[in-house]
Image (tube, grey):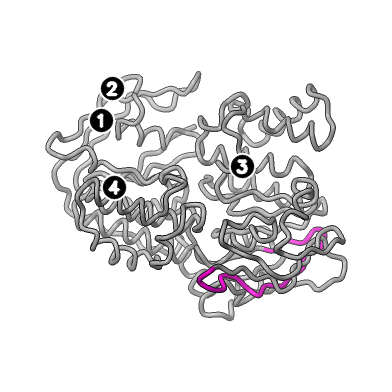
Amino acid sequence: MSRDMHKLLEIAGLCVRSAEGQLLGPVSFGLQAGQALTLLGESGSGKSLLAQAVMGTLPRGLRASGRIALAGKSFNADDASARRPMWGRQLALLPQEPWLALDPTMRVASQLAEVYGLVHGQSHMDARRQAVDELRTLGLAHAADAWPGMLSGGMAQRAAFAMTRAGGAPVLIVDEPTKGLDHVCRDEVVSRLQQALQAGCAVLTITHDIAVARALGGDVAVMLGGRIVEDGPAHAVLATPRHEYTRALIAADPQAWPMRPRGQAGREVMAAAGLSKRFGSRELFRGLDLALHAGDRIAVTGPSGSGKSTLGNVLLGLVASDAGTVLRQSDFEPVRYQKIYQDPTAAFAPRRSIGHALDDLCGRHRLERARIAPLMKQMRLIPALLGRRPAEVSGGELQRFALMRALLLDPVFLFADEPTSRLDPITQKEVMDVIADVTQDCGCALMLVTHDPHIAISVAHRQVEMPF
């Protein structure tokens, strides 16, 4: 990575520690205007911790050490309050969970306009006009007056990205900016990041998507166990990786996954006839018929906001259809129709530890607690994570806990809404293998939402395409 003296961001000996020991570092690097650095690595390797340490937003119980220099000013890494006045103006972060970047009590365009008004001093009318124009370029014109809770995960991600960029900060940290997005929207976000680079921004990108790293160019750093194990120019690292882990990361890209054979179909677990649903003035689907049997694996694909999550919610009875019927077998308990949410933070109580959440589940449904440890080992989740709250683990770790919790209930139907979009390629393949193997072994029907056509082809034997 560049060692030029004129840097917008410089990190020296950055470490993060908890009561259990060191989690990150020491990490040192510098970024100058127009330079991209992409961090690759497995979930829980420390990528998001690094971003939080730079911003000064580490979870409770974690301490940072080292030096951070921004706009010519040097700070102790643990002095978070000193960097806070720079947020949005000199340093901006797009968090991994878009819901954490959006105010649920404000409409989307109003939130974006507020940035233009407060940071750039625009009039209310000019700020509103620019906000609507920006949302239109991101394909969100129809969502300008929507509340954040009405947006799909992909739509929320694009809206949060627009707000992160609106302040014009010269140092931009983006944590998984393309997760949950279809390829068209992913390419649009990458194009925006490239524009930011051309405009002189220093861009630190955290991603599991190797295609994003290739497109951004610049430098790549690969993290494992809180340390950078390999770094260098993106074209060199991704073409001829030196470290064994980097080679495994690249080899696990979904394009290389084999197709799974179709198993024997069992009894029907769910049937839908003539389903129709509108969102405002837009029709999501009409006259949709589906039959799902034990052992079925169906992929639901389509652009962000096309109604994929809504379809699953209708099938589960979480959302009412406008027309049509859904029949679930009466001899199966309702709890055996399960969902893995696209946003795992929405599936856990924020103030309860993950261990308490699992204990509550076992107590409520009279499950054997002894089943937790083997599943955790299978998901590569360490026991120490059970004592943490949902916000204190990585998005990938939390998604694996969400999957594990659903599997503990022995589902007969599992609606998996982008269950691996937050995972690195290696963990993504491991978790998808677990989902496919477990659902096949227990005779569960799987409906998988994915934006990745390679995952759809590998895992499912049938696809439902949702047009926008």
Q: Amino acid at mark 4?
A: Leu
Instruction: Give the residue number, with chain letter if any, for mark 2.
Output: 324
Q: CA distance from mark 2 to mark 3?
A: 36 Å
Can you give x and y, in whole percent of width and height, for residue 188 in the image?
A: 64, 45
Q: Read off the magenta span.
A: 19-37
Viewer-side label of 3, 4: 3
Viewer-side label of 2, 3: 3
Q: CA distance from mark 3 to mark 1?
A: 36 Å
Please tell me which residue is depicted at 57% across the width and 71% down the height of the picture: 226
Graded by Cα atoms within 10 Å as few (under 14), some (14 to 19) or many (20 or more), the crowding at tag 3 reads: some
Please tell me which residue is depicted at 52% across the width and 45% down the height of the picture: 182
Instruction: Give the residue number, with chain letter if any, for mark 1.
Output: 272
Instruction: Give the residue number, with chain letter if any, for mark 3.
Output: 101
Against 260, is 347 above or below? above
What label does residue 446 carry, if any? 4
Name the element at disc 1. strand
- Mark closer to the chain start, 2 or 3: 3
Q: Amino acid at mark 2?
A: Gly
Q: Amino acid at mark 1?
A: Ala
Please tell me which residue is depicted at 51% across the width and 30% down the height of the picture: 150
Q: CA distance from mark 4 to mark 1?
A: 15 Å
Name the element at disc 2. strand
